[in-house]
Image: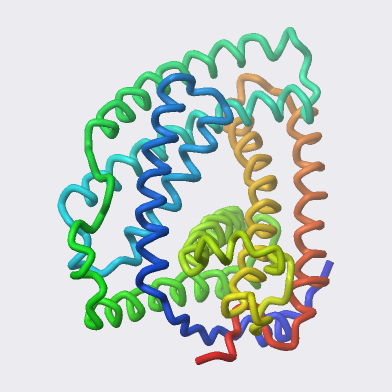
Amino acid sequence: MEVDLFLLMANLTIEISYPVDLDTFFDNYVHNVQKVGKRLEEYTKDPNEENIHDIRTAIRRLEASYRSSPKQLQKKKIKKYVGISKCLFKLNSEIRDFDIILEKLSNEGQISEQHLEPIKKSLEKKKDKKLGKALSVATDLKKINVSHPVKDSSFYKHNKIQKKLTRKYNKIVNGFASRIEKNLPVVISDSERIDELHEIRKDSKKLRYLFELLLSNKDRSNENVDKKGPLSGNTGDDVYGVSGLIGTLENIQDMLGVIHDHDVAIAYLKKHHTYQHNDVENNITVNRKNKYEQFIQYCKSDLLKSDDGFFLNKYR
């Protein structure tokens, strides 16, 4: 399935300069800190699949807030909190991979119970070991009190901080957008560029959470804001076309997440040659191919249909 790469690159022209509202940014920052605390409580009580997903998402949103805040606001305590939370995120990602492998082998690979049982025991043993480490890290994280990342509210309202925030935020946003622009034509032309596919997925997720920092509670509750709307332009109640971008990035993230899950299972089977489940690997590979083709079709039908481009913003 071929795509006009010249047209694709033309429509991915990046011209972003988003004015970040300081009050909205820090309202979201405080909310993201508090959300991690809430998710930590739920996770340590019951580290099930849903709570693992929720704590990972909360950590990613917190990281977006911290990453884009000016250095003057990156105090030692919040820096430590974010650092430990990233460690917890990594451990839970590995735990999730164990579950994904079992799910893919059992359902899509259609492996027999007889052959699945030794694999299941091995993965569950590794999962339990990782989970023990993750719960220990989560306990340490709960001991750090960062209910509000900025104590002096008058300090962060200063115009100087506002300018620094806007400059840093847009630099980071443009960085992620540029990486997506660079990698997308690569994966469009070669389905086996697994690393680049994985990078686009991660960058889309991080960029999505950065855009969420621009939305106030009023914006989120506004039913007129269409997250599946246009990729750029101001629709009045929409904020600089952000909600359309969030919807697009979420679509990319979801589709590439499914492909990544297939790649995790395939990599596991290739690494463990002793299992010799060729038919299982072939079944998963076929499903992976189908999901990849759906992603290509999305790029052709949705990402290329806007004359304004993917990340183009008219309001510089």
Q: In front here: 1 or 240?
A: 240
Figure check: 290 above or below 242: above
x 62%, y 33%: residue:
270
Q: Is residue 257 left or right of residue 133?
A: right
Q: How is the image coloured?
A: rainbow
x 64%, y 76%: residue:
237
Quadrant housing residue 230? bottom right
Task: Give the tally of numbered discs.
Answer: 0
Q: Is residue 277 left or right of residue 66?
A: right
x 61%, y 16%: residue:
119
x 39%, y 66%: residue:
25
Q: Is residue 214 left or right of residue 85?
A: right
Figure check: 163 above or below 208: below
Quadrant housing residue 265? top right
* Residue 5 % position (x, y): 72, 80
* Residue 100 % position (x, y): 63, 31
Is residue 189 visible in the rendered image? The answer is: no
Quadrant housing residue 139? top left
Q: In front here: 122 or 156?
A: 156
Return the residue found at the far left: 76
Is residue 157 visible in the rendered image? The answer is: yes
Q: In front here: 35 or 141?
A: 35
The quadrant the N terminus occupies is: bottom right
* Residue 50 % position (x, y): 58, 30
